[in-house]
Image (tube, rainbow, N blue to C red):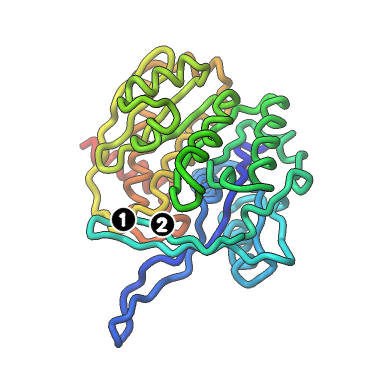
Amino acid sequence: MYDVVALGEILIDFTPAGKNSAGMQLFAQNPGGAPANVLAMNAKLGGKTAFIGKVGRDNFGAFLRRTMVDAGIDCTGLVEAEDVATTLAFVQLDEMGDRSFTFVRKPGADIMLTWDEVKTELLDRCRLFHFGSVSLTDNPSRTATYEAARYAKSQGALISYDPNYRQMLWPNEQVAIQEMRKPLELVDILKVSEAEMPLLTDEKSLESGAKKLIDQGIALVVATLGPDGSYFRTRQSSGYCKAYRVNTIDTTGAGDAFVGSLHHRLSGLSLDDINALDETDWMDIMRFCNAAAGLTTTRYGAIPAMPSSDQIQAYLADKAT
């Protein structure tokens, strides 16, 4: 069995890497894509994971496959396209380390995944299926994502969803809202940002939005709040968990490290088990996830920056003294 199977984008993040002698910006080639990042974090913590997605049959695609294999992710579900290139994203960082993206994706291989290319045998053997909204931005990957989520649910997997809104990838906000809300009826675990909550619920308040989602049948809603930490809500409890103060240089992949750590901490639990966790349990989980996310921001890139279990535990032990 796989602890987590994720479907979605795997791409190249070109992240800032200083300037050349002429003062021009240099970029470093890094593996990226939220679903792949989530799996990498889980695998680094000891989880068994598998990825479903599409890259071009090019040097970038080969690099991404090697990266995932080296990270311990099963890549038997990775498809190589002959007619489209691997998707690229150029990351810009502001003075606080926060990032914005420019995508080379008209189309990119990631959105060309079709439902008949999805290896359903991976979904047959997963405890949790995870996806985001980047694969919902266009067809055929939109249909492939919806169908995979439905199929995994029918096979008894828990369903995890991260809306991960990227405005420039959608034709307009109305289409984004419509498509991002469609999977909610299938979802057990939802991770959002503060900015995404109104898109999913029409609620500006994080607390009221989370309650609305829980009332719709979602078991767990978690929100990542950057330097302010995280928030969780279940039917039984809710609360905020403060972030740890770190020397942030690049926030790329921090939210994905949080989600991968969350999946790891919930590994092996049924929906009933998750519903039975109390506030003390959740605060312990949130502290672990906050630490993983925070440590990821202290290095450049996403997958290369993710901490090990020993590093997280040592950091938490240090903060507890």
Image quadrant containing the N terminus: top right
What residue sits 60% from the left and 52% below the top?
72
What residue sits 72% from the left and 27% below the top?
155
The x, y position of residue 303, in whole percent, is: 47, 56
Most distant residue in the bottom direction: 21
Whether label 1 touches label 2, CB < 8 Å: yes
Which mark, by number, is residue 298?
A: 1
Q: Quadrant of residue 64?
A: bottom right
Q: Tell me the distance, in whole angstroms, between the alpha carbons under discs 1 and 2.
A: 8 Å
Side of 248 relative to 80 (left or right): left
Mark 1: secondary structure: loop
Q: Residues within 10 Å of mark 1 (few under 14, many from 20)?
A: some
Side of 163 relative to 195 (left or right): right
Q: Amino acid at mark 1?
A: Thr
What residue sits 31% from the left and 61% below the top?
93
What residue sits 64% from the left and 59% below the top?
109
Mark 2: secondary structure: helix
Which mark, by number, is residue 11?
A: none
The x, y position of residue 239, in whole percent, is: 31, 22
Q: Quadrant of residue 143?
A: top right
Nearer to me, 288 or 11 = 11
Side of 246 relative to 181 (left or right): left
Name the residue carrying label 2: 305
Image quadrant containing the C terminus: top left
The x, y position of residue 195, in whole percent, is: 35, 38
The x, y position of residue 168, in whole percent, is: 45, 53
Q: Amino acid at mark 2?
A: Ala
Mark 1 or mark 2: which comes first in sequence? Answer: 1
Q: Quadrant of residue 7?
A: top right
